[in-house]
Amino acid sequence: TGSVETLITSSADEPFTVYGLIAASFEWPNDRSWVIFNLRSQARWHDGTPVTADDVVWSFDTLMEKGAPGYRYYYSAVESAEKLGEHRVRFNFKEAGNRELPLIMGQLPVLPKHYWVDRDFTETTLEPPLGSGPYRIKEFEAGRYIVQERVPDYWGKNLAVNRGMNNLDTIRTDYYRDATSIRLALKAGDIDLRSENQSKAWAEDYNVEAVEKGLLKKEMVPHQMPTGMQGFVFNTRRGIFKDPQVREALGYAFDFEWSNRTLFNGQYTRTASYFSNSDLASSGLPEGEELKLLEQYRSRLPERVFTDEFQPPVTDGSGRPRENLRTAAALLEAAGWEIRDLKLVNVETGAPMVFEILLYSPAFERIVLPFTRNLEQLGIEASIRLVDQTQYINRFREKDFDMLVWTWGESETPGNEQRGYWGTDAADATGSRNLAGIKDPVVDELIELLVMSESREQLNVRTRALDRVLLWGFYVIPQWHIRADRVLYWDKFSRPDSPVRTGVMTGRWWYDETKAAALEHARQ
């Protein structure tokens, strides 16, 4: 990742601010019907060839034609890329008024046309690709490790956006078969740094002498970034999940309070928004401009959007959510389901409610099993299917699942990507992230309004309205989030004292020879 660069880059401590990287400057008209990027003449590929407008145009055209499906959704509002000069390129937009689109185009990965012209971009390769960034691949062994080395004559090392960054001479990334092996390697000193994403491991697996002595640092680093939505996702393409009342009912079978207390050591907060941990999240009842916007769709929305605050079901944490299960049973009965011979069946067809929860991480089984046991009390047969990551990705791409666990990440400036997350056009597209299969004209219209927002205030209002409509659609059973990064590292690095909004940012770290020597001495 240290090899590929974009036209612009964001600031870690300045929200809603970007600076030029490959681009020295950019310009657009008042109606934002196009954007022009003026490239830095000193920008170079690692072979010394200049980065030009031809590279930018080729990158856009190739990613749209041959790249992952997400690119086609992300850049769907772009009509064309046009070379205006050796270091000047223009993107023409299909519609005017998209406030975010010029900045989205600045995030385009720029690839070397001269390198790829004689290679097949769609073929898997073990040849390290040519890049322009501060690092390049030095060596690797497929499936085991990659070593990146700092480029000594990196063209952009003196840019203001890069000062204080990219301080490590080499970065080696090792690959392991499972998380347990990674943790053992860290404690043995075979690796220097790990970001831990499992609460149980964070609480229990690092109670070792090295941590107690401060040799192996264990830190929770707060961040101020949106945490998005992680949850059990209903595939509404499946008949049993087409009814939102059924989806709502099943949410009452997930006991977050018990899970957080028993399984997560109280580390998590329940998620109640698709834009959690941000000012974009809906809360309370709609009011002001948000209410005014939603009123336009009132006849097509559940009345509770206007009368009730959305909150996921809450339990007492005892592990016996009887009241919630009674509520779930009542909702299922109202939706046309009943118990026959201890099984929940559809009143009209007699078909039982049976579905599969798709997972690829064994660590999630202990979390999902209590959920399936609660579902069993409702007469529902929910099984867990654990597959390897390759199968998981293939089934995700083809939407071949009943329910799975997924996380939609969100930025502070949501825009075009929302079409690929929730839009009707993405619902049946291979590889799209509209996993739930949402096809709602109100959602589509709110997405378009969001994309065309003309101010931060307008973006906030429209995003909160979209959030609220999605929540009351019960497309997911929200899970949890944490407002910090959990990181462990051997005490051989230093970093600036001032924290950044984005949490752990290892690009600012440097190897501290004094600390490394002290660590080596202490471990002897």
Image: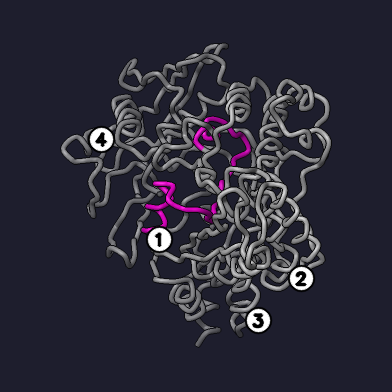
Mark 1 residue crowding within 10 angstroms, few (<14) / some (14–19) / many (20+): few
Q: Is residue 320 above or below residue 25?
A: below
Q: Nearer the viewer, mark 4 or mark 1?
A: 1
Residue 51 sits in which quadrant? top left
> Residue 361 or 3: which is nearer the viewer?
361
Residue 374 drawn at (x, y percent): 67, 66
Residue 200, percent from left and from top: 62, 73
Q: Write down the residue under mark 1.
A: 389
Q: Amino acid at mark 2?
A: Arg
Taking 127 as reference, is 206 above or below it? below
Tell me: 217 left or right of 512.
right
| CA distance separating discs 1 and 2 | 33 Å
Circle nearer the viewer, 4 or 2: 2
Q: Residue 208: in sight, yes or no?
A: yes
Q: Is residue 402 magenta?
A: yes
Span of residues in magenta? 391-420
Q: Position of residue 262 (x, y in %)?
A: 71, 73
Say what secondary structure mark 2 lies in.
loop
Up-down: is 244 above or below 455?
below
Residue that carries the numbered disc 2 in the rendered image: 320
Comparing marks 3 and 1, which lies closer to the viewer? 1
**10 Å neighbourhood of mark 4: few (<14), some, or many (≥20)?**
few
- Which one is closest to the eye, mark 1 or mark 2? 2
User: Hey, what amino acid is under mark 3?
Assistant: Glu
Task: Tell me how far mark 3 sits from mark 2, CA to CA.
Answer: 37 Å
Q: Earlier in the sequence, mark 4 or mark 1?
A: 4
Q: Amino acid at mark 4?
A: Thr
